[in-house]
Amino acid sequence: MTRTVRSALVAALLVLTCAAPAVAVPPPPPKPSDQEVQDSKTDRDTKAGRVGELTNQLATAETKLTDLQANVELKMEDANKALVDLDTARAAADKARDDAAATRREADAAAAVIDRIRQDVDDFAAASFRQGSTIGSMSAFFGAKSPQDLLDRAQMLNAVSGSQLDALDRMQVARVDQANKDSLARAALAMADQKQAEAQRAKQVADAATRAAEEARRTQAADAAKIEADKANTEQQLQDAQAKVGDLESQLQRYRDWQAAKQKEDEERAKQAAAANANRPGRPAPSRPSAGRPAVGSNAVQLVIARALAQLGMPYAWGGGNANGPSRGIRDGGVADMFGDFNKIGFDCSGLMIYAFAGAGVSLPHYSGYQATSGQRVPLSQMQPGDMLFWATGGQIHHVALYIGNGQMIEAPYSGSRVRIAPVRYGGIVPYATRVL
């Protein structure tokens, strides 16, 4: 076999063996259309807006419910006051009734005493008339031992008559006094009865007000419960819409990954074909790279980006991620719990940054607000691959992503999604990037 023939056979064999890479890229995965992705995002945003509306409505309804509950409590206290006042009025009326009965009995007793004394005086006067004297029975003078004794006995009879008349006068005054007390007691009883009636009416009004307030509270509670049910239903729809967006974006990312792998395969095939052609007889050997050229990915920025890219498709888990990789999420008492983040292994936005920069020996806190102050701040117009980008609402930072160049970034976006590559979003972005490396 001649040298020329052997060279031709070697070249042909080299073309056949080098033309195909060791592992061929599989067929392309399904690629969702841009319209499908956009429609799913629009649906998600619409439902998110509806959740926001219902959240506001629920907050308003709960505020109103709280006010109505406070009003119910106020009305109940008014009813309690009216009940206490009614009990007090009843007790006062009972006492006034007892006092009136007592003064009536005392007045009747005084009248009876006066009648008895008057009868005694009348009897004394009648006896004196029958004896022809105003000093009493003649028998009182019998046995007098001297004129002086007789005079003393006459004075004694006169004193008896005078004391009875004095007693009659005193009892008459007492009777008038008791009559006055009886009149006052009856007036007090009438006033107590009036106050009792007024207290009874006030109690009825307070009870009616309490019932009306409680009915208003029940109605508002039912409205709030309905809004809360609508909100829960819409949140479920939002979760489904977010999942759909995440699925479509994951499909799209898989397709892009396939495109990159396919491009790499094609480039490899082209290099192999060029090498085969270069080794054919009469072709000069290709030149070698110059010594000292740094290898691709040898610097820290490329290492950080590579670590982040290695987590594409990893689930979002609120509170997840550390320097060693993905970790279990934690409870937040809200949206993250609704998506079950505490049962997922993955990253949240700041956790992904912790893992990526740990590869370059940089330790970051697990809070995007602190990460924003962990390096040099540069204007967005000067951002470079490896810089961190931040978003804020009301001046408070709540999200972070890693810029990877060409207007793209990698992020762990939100509960229900996965780590992804996305175009830089400028809505709500803070006006600087943070450069750690």
Image (cartoon, rainbow, N blue to C red):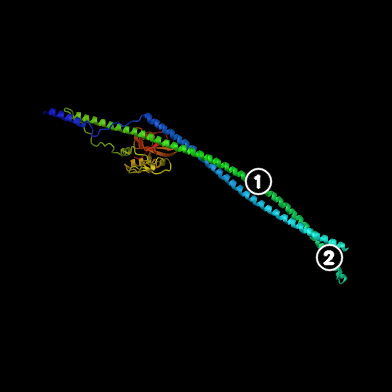
- Say which mark, if any, is on residue 34: none
Identify residue for label 1. Answer: 198
Please, what secondary structure does the residue beneath circle 2 have? helix
Q: Quadrant of residue 69?
A: top right
Residue 430 position, x and y percent, is 41, 36
Quick one: 427 or 189, which is closer to the camera? 189
Name the residue at 83% across, 65% down.
157
Q: Residues within 10 Å of mark 2 (few under 14, many from 20)?
A: some
In screen coordinates, is 153 left or right of 429? right
Amino acid type, residue under disc 1 in the picture: Glu
User: Is residue 239 among the parts visible in the rendering?
Assistant: yes
In screen coordinates, is 284 left or right of 46? left
In screen coordinates, is 151 left or right of 283? right
Residue 24 position, x and y percent, is 25, 33
Identify residue for label 2. Answer: 157
Q: Which quarter shows the N terminus?
A: top left
Name the residue at 60% across, 43% down.
208
Q: Residue furthest bottom?
A: 145
Residue 269 position, x and y percent, is 24, 30
Quick one: 356 or 25, which is closer to the camera? 25
Please, what secondary structure does the residue beneath circle 1 have? helix
Position above or below: 133 against 207: below
Quick one: 196 or 413, which is closer to the camera? 196
